[in-house]
């Protein structure tokens, strides 16, 4: 049986319409992949609280992430080798731009996600490595910038 994994994920979009993704390189030989900032909820934490914490820890921005804009269920094997059933809630955060401050990364994050990049939809379409969520281009098109809500 898969372990439940509630998670908050952030669609961090800059002023040029690009989304920030981190490149994960599993240490068990699985292929590298790209993913939005975010992660598992801590005990007693709401999705909104987790989104703010993850944005602060992974990117260095401390701000309200606004309301949830999407939800997806997915099964996967975590970097740590745990089979999970994830309930992922997405939050869109629009910024003019920002530099990633990785000083809040955990030891595991420092080992497996040492690279990040801003991607336009065209960049994503041309990417030769997997990225998640797989419908990210459509998800970005379906969600509005926070100031347009």
Image (cartoon, rainbow, N blue to C red):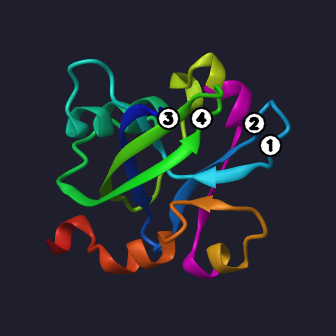
**Residue 3 position within the rendered picture, expressed as x and y whole percent measured from the top left:** 44, 30
What's the CA distance linking mark 3 and mark 4?
17 Å
What residue is pinned by disc 2? 26
State the separation of the CA atoms marked 1 and 2. Answer: 6 Å
Residue 71, x across and y down, in percent: 30, 57
Q: Is residue 97 left or right of residue 45?
A: right
Q: Residue at x 18, y 75 (%)?
A: 148
Closer to the chain start, of discs 2 and 4, is 2
**Disc number for residue 58:** 3
Q: Earlier in the sequence, mark 4 or mark 1?
A: 1
Q: Secondary structure at mark 4?
A: loop
46 with respect to 25 (left or right)? left
Taking the spot 40% from the left edge, 58% from the top edge, the residue there is 11
- Residue under pointer 4: 78
What residue is rendered at 42% in x and 56% in y?
12
Q: CA distance from mark 2 to mark 3?
A: 17 Å
What is the residue that sits farthest to the right in this orientation?
29
Query: Which residue lies under the disc numbered 1?
Result: 30
Q: Nearer the viewer, mark 1 or mark 2?
A: 1
What is the CA distance from the residue labelled 3 to the residue labelled 1?
22 Å
Q: Is residue 96 above or below residue 82?
A: below
Give the magenta-colored segment's residue range: 109-122
Q: Quadrant of residue 128?
A: bottom right
Q: Which element carries disc 2, helix, strand or loop?
A: loop
CB under 8 Å between discs 1 and 2:
yes
Residue 78 rendering spot, x and y as whole percentages: 59, 35
- Tell which of 109 and 133 is nearer to you: 133
Q: Is residue 99 visible?
A: no
């Amino acid at each position: 049986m898969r372990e439940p994994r509630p998670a908050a994920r952030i669609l961090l979009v800059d002023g040029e319409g690009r989304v920030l993704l981190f490149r994960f390189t599993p240490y068990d030989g699985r292929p590298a992949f790209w993913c939005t900032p975010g992660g598992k909820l801590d005990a007693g934490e709401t999705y909104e609280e987790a989104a703010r914490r993850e944005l602060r820890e992974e990117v260095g921005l401390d701000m309200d992430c606004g309301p949830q804009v999407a939800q997806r269920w997915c099964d996967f094997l975590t970097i740590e080798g745990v089979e999970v059933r994830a309930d992922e809630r997405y939050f869109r955060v629009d910024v003019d731009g920002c530099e990633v401050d990785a000083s809040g990364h955990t030891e595991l994050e420092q080992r497996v996600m040492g690279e990040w990049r801003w991607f336009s939809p065209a960049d994503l379409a041309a990417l030769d490595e997997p990225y998640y969520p797989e419908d990210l281009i459509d998800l970005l098109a379906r969600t509005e910038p926070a100031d347009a809500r």
